[in-house]
Image (cartoon, grey):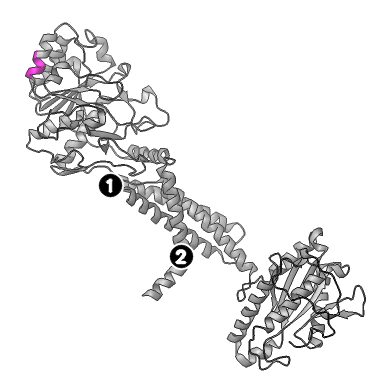
Amino acid sequence: MRIVFNRVWEKYRSILTVSTGVTLFVAAFGYLGALQSLELSFYDAFMRSRPPEAIDPRIVLVTVDEATLTRLPRWPLSDADLARVIEAIAAQSPDVIGLNLYRNVPINPGTERWQEVARQTENLIGVEKIGFPKVDPPKILAELNRVAFVDVPLDLDQRQRRAFLSVRTSEIGQRDSVADPDLPNNIRLSFAMQLSKVYLDKRGIHPEISQARQTIIPWGKARFQSLIGYEGGYAYGSVPGYQILLDYRGRQPEQFITISLEDVLYDRVPLGTFTGKIVVLGTTAISLENFLYTPYVYGAISAEHATPSLYIQANIVSQIISAVLDGREFLRAAKPTVALLWTWCWTIAFNVAYWAIVMHQAAPKLRPGSLERQLILGAVATSLIVVITSYLCFRNHLWLPTVAPTLAGLGAGLIMLVRQRSSFARLATTDGLTKLANRRYFDMFLDQCWNDKKTRRDLSLLLCDVDFFKRYNDTYGHQAGDTCLVTVAEVLDEVVRKSDLVARYGGEEFAIVMPGCSIELAERIADKICRAVYQLNVEHRSSEVADRVTISCGIASTGLGRFDQTYDLIEEADRALYLAKQEGRNCYRVLYSLASPTSTSSTSQLARSHSDSETQHINAVDQPHTTDQPTDRPL
């Protein structure tokens, strides 16, 4: 099992690590609020695309629209006219009446009559505004403890996507309330919640509230669960009060029965219209400016796209009683951990798709540019799948992030693409066995150094060949031969400077390009290579030079003369290598054919000065011998 896990991990490690890193980065980015507006845009689009629900027959709205305003005797209504309206509604025995009008000051005539009617109508609920600016409730209803707050939570774009069910008095700076014996003393209910509670109490259905900070409330067929912060696409870390997502029934006002206040005032409403219903009285006239903005508003907000607050309160009431009585599911926002896991899974999906495309498109038969086109199509297709899946979840009452997984997937895919491109580049320029540069990259690097006038002045080239390597393969086998080449390659890579390039030139032959390297320094490096390989003590019984693996080197340098092209430099180094093999191997040779056609030299035959700048990059380089004993003998 562990072996299988290790194999899977090695195969998909890069996908998992990149996906995890990008997911955490995007999540942190989202928690700072950078993605919230985009997430809410998708939320609104999903909300608008849902089909409208049927009219809720349990709610009746008594409205004051622009046409009604022109025909009413006055506005605001006098206390006498308001009392007549409430009496007319109460006469049909509704279960609860909600007065969604601010009546914080008396409006004569008829104030005493209004107070008497309000006192007698025990199911009448008034409103107050507890936020800034504060608006007091009707005095008579406040004395009777029959008021609720009408404040709503707005997002930064001034749209209402959430609804209050209650707040704690400590959150609004008020003393504990004893308005409802079924609730803890420090709980204040919202207007919609109060109307729903009165309506459901008459049916013997009560919420199971045991404490002020209770987040899950069983109530009838529903389980209410409050928002706590960072759910769905929100970046709010703290959510005051008890809030839920507002699940609109559709575009207003088509989802509710509406009656004109004028018809109520002049007794033109059929009997039974209000019986057993939740009746809410409020304004819909835009000129009265009692409106809000909802997800159904496209683009910039304006008064012509506003929704009267009466319809929004009706939606909240309908959402509550439909959940409690009918079991209608709540629109829930995914918890932060679920949203993070959702984003991570989609990021992996993006990466797997990119990886599959890259692997498929790696075939040489594909035309140039095909990979980029396929990746773009793959990114678009995967993004559409994310959006469609998020929408289907939304239709099933679960709001999941859309922008975060798409952004994380695209970002991770881009990183994977860059890494894959880099990997392909390495594969194209790296020898598979020794992990050194291959012949192709050697040619490119040498040309680059040759074309740079600064590096061409002192450009040295070493060609190295493992002595009697064919015999080594025949004696010890090809696997041992491969191991030997890898070991020698590691030695070469350790000896040279960081600016030098070591490449596998072919078979057992290696090439070292040394830009900005004088002939003296090149000889010292070659000398160290011969010694280091010899000191590896790799057994080689078939060698005619020693009982261990050895190496021979040929050196060419532009410092010795003028070369017309890189081919000439390579030819010079190759002739020097051939000379080293002729003269016993396990040594290096330099040809001075350009300076003196008949001269040859080894380290012991040179007398040159070395500056500190030429040798400071070589650690523990042996000083060249100056005695009569040559270093080209077998070590």
Please name the residue that numbered disc 2 is placed on.
13
In-front residue for pair 177/101: 177
Distance between the alpha carbons at the discs numbered 2 and 1: 34 Å
For label 2, the SS is helix
Please name the residue that numbered disc 1 is placed on.
396
In-front residue for pair 327/538: 538
Q: Position of residue 394 (x, y in %)?
A: 31, 45
Q: Amino acid at mark 1?
A: Asn
Point out the stretch of residues depicted in magenta: 116-120
Q: Amino acid at mark 2?
A: Arg
Q: In the drawing, what numbered circle is on residue 260?
A: none
Tell me the quarter of the picture where residue 86 sits.
top left
Point out the image quarter for the C terminus: bottom right
Residue projecting furthest to the top? 109
The answer, for residue 420, to whether it is visible in the render is yes
Point out the image quarter for the N terminus: bottom left
